[in-house]
Image: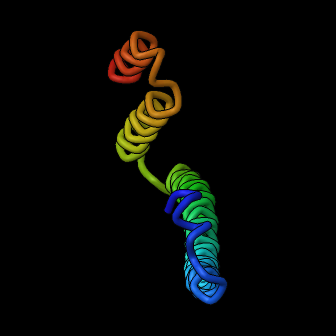
């Protein structure tokens, strides 16, 4: 409405307009509060998801270290009681595993990893 139209209105009509605007403001405030509440809930879910993912990655690293320790233990037991042929096979296997882990850890040094693999195959 223009200023002229507002000046021509009676007080009761102006009050009705004010009441309607106040209802609209209250409704919009409620919608905003609901939207903020939903946003806070989503942020919590996202934060928990990040924490769970981090925990899973850490556990994965722990399991990998435990597996390596178990493999090393089994290898050392095999060294003490296995015949020479079995030892050479196990040694080649561990060398290949070490080369593969080196490649995974250092993907930028692919040329060096290839040389390491060639050396381990010659054994």
Residue 30: image quadrant is: bottom right
Q: Is residue 16 left or right of residue 89?
A: right
Q: Nearer the viewer, residue 44 or 16?
A: 16
Residue occupying the point 50% across, 29% down: 102
Q: Position of residue 27 (x, y in %)?
A: 57, 84
Instruction: Please say if 88 is above or below 26.
Output: above
Colouring convention used in this rendered image of the protein: rainbow
Q: Position of residue 37 (x, y in %)?
A: 62, 79
Q: Nearer the viewer, residue 43 or 68?
A: 43
Residue occupying the point 60% across, 64% down: 59
Residue occupying the point 52% across, 52% down: 75
Residue occupying the point 36% across, 16% down: 114
Is residue 3 in view from this perspective? yes
Instruction: Please say if 85 is above or below 62.
Output: above
Q: Quadrant of the C terminus?
A: top left
Q: Position of residue 115 (x, y in %)?
A: 40, 12
Residue 39: image quadrant is: bottom right
Is residue 38 in view from this perspective? no
**Number of numbered tags placed on the structure image:** 0
Instruction: Please say if 27 is above or below 80.
Output: below
Q: Position of residue 117 (x, y in %)?
A: 37, 21
């Amino acid at each position: 409405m223009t200023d002229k139209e507002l000046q021509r209105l009676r007080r009761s009509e102006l009050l009705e307009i004010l009441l309607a605007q106040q209802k609209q403001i209250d409704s919009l405030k409620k919608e905003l509060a609901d939207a903020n509440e939903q946003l806070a809930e989503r942020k919590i879910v996202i934060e928990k998801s990040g924490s769970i993912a981090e925990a899973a990655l850490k556990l994965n690293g722990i399991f990998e270290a435990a597996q390596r320790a178990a493999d090393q233990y089994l290898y050392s037991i095999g060294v003490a009681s296995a015949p020479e042929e079995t030892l050479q096979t196990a040694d080649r296997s561990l060398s290949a595993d070490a080369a593969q882990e080196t490649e995974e850890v250092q993907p930028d040094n692919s040329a060096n990893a290839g040389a390491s693999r060639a050396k381990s195959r010659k054994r």
